[in-house]
Amino acid sequence: MTRFARTRIVAVAVGAAAAVGLALTGCSSDTPNTTDTAAISLQDSWVKAADSGVTAMFGTIVNDSDDAVTLTSVTTTVSPRVELHETAPDGTGAMKMRQKDGGVTVAAHDSYELAPGGDHIMLFDLPAPVQAGADVTFTFEFADGATTEFTSQVRDFTGAREDYGTHGESHDG
């Protein structure tokens, strides 16, 4: 074997080893999922019954972990569009419901309330009625990509007289 052939074999072997090393490095992450989903719970959750249009989910997100977590999105099979909403002043002195930018952060060993007339999870464009007594499963996704599922029961509710609008755009509370 010539010196050129040996050099080429060594170069190919070194290149292959480097490629494998890079591939394995690409499989690992410098920012692993840190949300301890086992320490996150959704307590006293429920969904307001609705025949069509929009509705909302309420409850208390509890974070029993040692780190703050940020809920960035929620999905469910009963609605093609789900948003995290807050109730905030609209500049005229009235309160308005709107999508919450950046998600919902729950501090370590703390909770975050979702309530009628307050912050909530909004379900838009219901393709079918959401009827009292049914269960709805939600998937919560956190800022680091971790996910967990919760189930909420649908209830009749006429309480806070919130107006969720009919078109799923902005809506006043």
Image: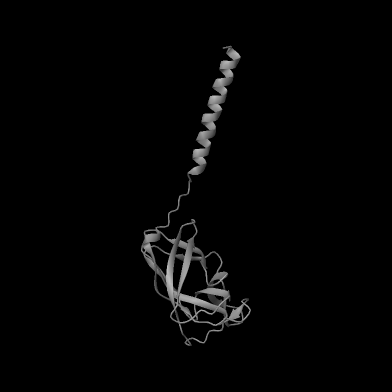
Q: Relative to 123, is 158 above or below?
A: below
Q: Position of residue 2 (x, y in %)?
A: 59, 11
Q: Position of residue 91 (x, y in %)?
A: 61, 78
Q: Relative to 24, is 146 above or below?
A: below
Judging depth in this view, the residue of 135 and 17 nearest the camera is 135
The quarter of the picture where residue 44 lies is: bottom left
Tally the marks.
Answer: 0
Position of the N terminus, as image quadrant, is top right
Q: Residue at x 52, y 87 (%)?
A: 161
The quarter of the picture where residue 170 lies is: bottom right
Q: Is residue 84 left or right of residue 111?
A: right
Q: Is residue 115 left or right of residue 65?
A: right
Judging depth in this view, the residue of 101 and 164 nearest the camera is 164
Q: Position of residue 29 (x, y in %)?
A: 48, 46
Position of the C terminus, as image quadrant, is bottom right
Judging depth in this view, the residue of 121 and 53 nearest the camera is 53
Judging depth in this view, the residue of 29 and 135 nearest the camera is 135
Q: Residue at x 44, y 65 (%)?
A: 149
Q: Relative to 144, is 2 above or below?
A: above
Colour scheme in the image?
Answer: one colour
Q: Position of residue 62 (x, y in %)?
A: 39, 68
